[in-house]
Image (tube, rainbow, N blue to C red):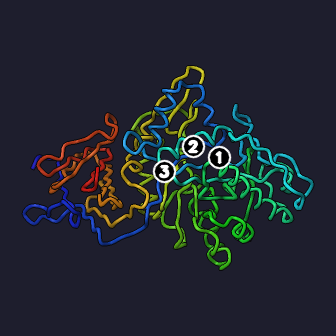
């Protein structure tokens, strides 16, 4: 064996042999030990970010859509998060019209809706996503219209007036009916975003107890959809919302998906529920546009790969939804669009998420994976087509040789100079390069 190269073998994985000479395996995958089902991976393009694409040529728009949603050319993203009437103040995209912008005359008055069939280009992107096979459309309200709130404003926090609870629930469900008329079925519906954070843009406060109470109003009206709660500002903070819902049998009945963000606190364990759990929004802090894979900035590609790994393994998340797929300027989105120059760029963050989204398909099940090498972060998944996908993040400075791979195996490398590039599996081994993510697929139809 070469100096500085460590051997690693997987056991219990179809197409993988034991380590030679009886050496204990550094990585073990046990397919018979199953964990959570995977709903998918996704992005949001709320706050009118889809309109940036309109500055590009049709060919460029198709390239971006392929990168987001194509299951072989791109990331194969399978969840699209939509913003219901939300807008950041002070940006060139600060106007996002509610479908009921004015008070109809009180909570019991017939609603007066306005719908343009476009919803700030969200309908267009949703239709395109659907053509690629996306089936999960997650509609999320940042705030109720201002007239439903005690501060009279859709921005700056405030709370929902109790007498408007049913009207707000109907407002949300009617939004999904407009999408249905456009041919898009909203599968997942959330009434709050970061209810524990007051923002100068669209925001609305709920305590955990208030959220549990509103769920019982929304649930019976939103039949046929997954009621989602509560998109807390941090993962640890989300536990309080999950506990409040789980403690109330009627609220627990209606909430099908529990969600949390990872701004205030990162994923360090599961949420206290047996329902589905999504990491539903995050992008790292940063002050510049950064395309690098591994530069120690905390908003490079390696950072995203590790965050996804932690959400799936520590948090036992069923889905991972990144914040923006594309934005402008010093964004930490997956892509940067210069709508003045009519160009776009792709960050290594995109390829980190693509490694998971392309190969771990909706309906896959995470299976047990462990490593005796502290430099290796390993997760494994069994797809419905029979393929097993193993993701290995080598955080160390030395290459590691995965020995004993056999059968119909393919491997893909993502690092500073490779973007899901095929790498050799000849001779039954794959070299896991330092500071990299290697995706190994065994079996299936690929």
Q: Nearer the viewer, mark 2 or mark 3?
A: 2
**Residue at the extreme top of the image, as rendered:** 341
Q: Where does label 3 land, which residue?
A: 78
- On screen, residue 375 versus residue 173, left or right, reads left
- Callout count: 3
Q: CA distance from mark 2 to mark 1?
A: 8 Å
Q: Secondary structure at mark 1?
A: loop
Q: CA distance from mark 2 to mark 3?
A: 13 Å
Q: Position of residue 246 (x, y in %)?
A: 62, 75
Q: Position of residue 438 (x, y in %)?
A: 29, 48
Q: CA distance from mark 3 to mark 1?
A: 19 Å
Identify the residue at horizontal 41%, vertical 35% (top origin).
292
Q: Secondary structure at mark 3?
A: loop
Identify the residue at horizontal 70%, vertical 41% (top origin).
117
Q: Examine the rendering and report whether any part of residue 81 can be seen.
A: yes
Q: Where does label 1 land, which residue?
A: 182
Q: Does the CB distance between marks 2 and 1 fall below 8 Å?
A: yes
> Which class describes the residues within 10 Å of circle 1: few (<14), some (14-19), or many (20+)?
some
Q: Is 202 rendered above or below residue 330?
A: below
Q: Where does label 2 land, which residue?
A: 127
Q: Position of residue 391 (x, y in %)?
A: 32, 53
Camera-side residue of 380 and 185: 185
- The part of the image, by quadrant, that contains residue 262 is bottom right
């Amino acid at each position: 064996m070469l100096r500085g190269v460590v051997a690693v073998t997987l056991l219990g994985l179809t197409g993988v042999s034991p380590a030679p000479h009886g050496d204990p395996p550094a990585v073990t995958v046990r397919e018979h030990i199953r964990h959570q089902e995977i709903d998918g991976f996704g992005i949001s393009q709320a706050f009118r970010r889809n309109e940036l694409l309109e500055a590009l040529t049709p060919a460029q728009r198709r390239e971006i859509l392929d990168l987001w949603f194509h299951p072989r050319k791109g990331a194969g993203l399978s969840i699209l998060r939509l913003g219901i009437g939300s807008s950041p103040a002070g940006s060139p995209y600060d106007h996002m019209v509610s479908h009921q912008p004015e008070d109809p005359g009180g909570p019991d008055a017939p609603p007066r809706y306005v719908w343009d069939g476009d919803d700030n280009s969200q309908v267009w992107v949703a239709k395109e996503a659907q053509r690629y096979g996306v089936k999960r459309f997650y509609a999320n309200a940042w705030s109720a219209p201002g007239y439903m709130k005690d501060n009279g404003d859709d921005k700056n926090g405030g709370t929902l007036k109790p007498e408007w609870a049913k009207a707000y629930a109907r407002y949300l469900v009617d939004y999904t009916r407009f999408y249905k008329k456009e041919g898009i079925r909203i599968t997942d519906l959330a009434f709050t975003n970061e209810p524990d954070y007051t923002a100068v843009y669209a925001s609305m406060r709920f305590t955990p107890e208030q959220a549990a109470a509103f769920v019982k109003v929304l649930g019976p009206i939103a039949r046929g959809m997954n009621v989602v709660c509560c998109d807390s500002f941090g993962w640890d903070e989300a536990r309080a919302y999950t506990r409040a819902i789980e403690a109330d049998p009627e609220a627990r009945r209606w909430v099908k998906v529990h969600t949390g963000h990872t701004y205030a606190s990162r994923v360090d364990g599961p949420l206290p529920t047996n329902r589905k759990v999504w990491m539903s929004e995050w992008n790292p802090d940063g002050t510049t546009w950064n395309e690098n894979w591994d530069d120690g900035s905390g908003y490079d590609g390696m950072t995203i790969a590790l965050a996804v790994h932690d959400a799936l393994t520590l948090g036992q998340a069923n889905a991972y939804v990144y914040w923006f797929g594309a934005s402008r300027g010093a964004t930490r989105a997956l892509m940067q669009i210069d709508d003045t120059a009519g160009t776009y760029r792709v960050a290594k963050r995109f390829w980190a998420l693509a490694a998971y989204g392309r190969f771990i398909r909706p309906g896959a099940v995470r299976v047990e994976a462990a490593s005796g090498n502290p430099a290796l972060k390993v997760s494994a998944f069994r797809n419905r087509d029979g393929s097993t996908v193993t993701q290995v993040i080598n955080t160390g400075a030395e290459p590691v040789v995965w020995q004993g791979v056999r059968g119909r195996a393919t491997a893909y490398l993502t690092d500073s100079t490779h973007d899901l590039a095929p790498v050799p599996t000849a001779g039954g081994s794959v070299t896991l390069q330092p500071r990299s993510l290697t995706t190994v697929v065994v079996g299936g139809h690929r």
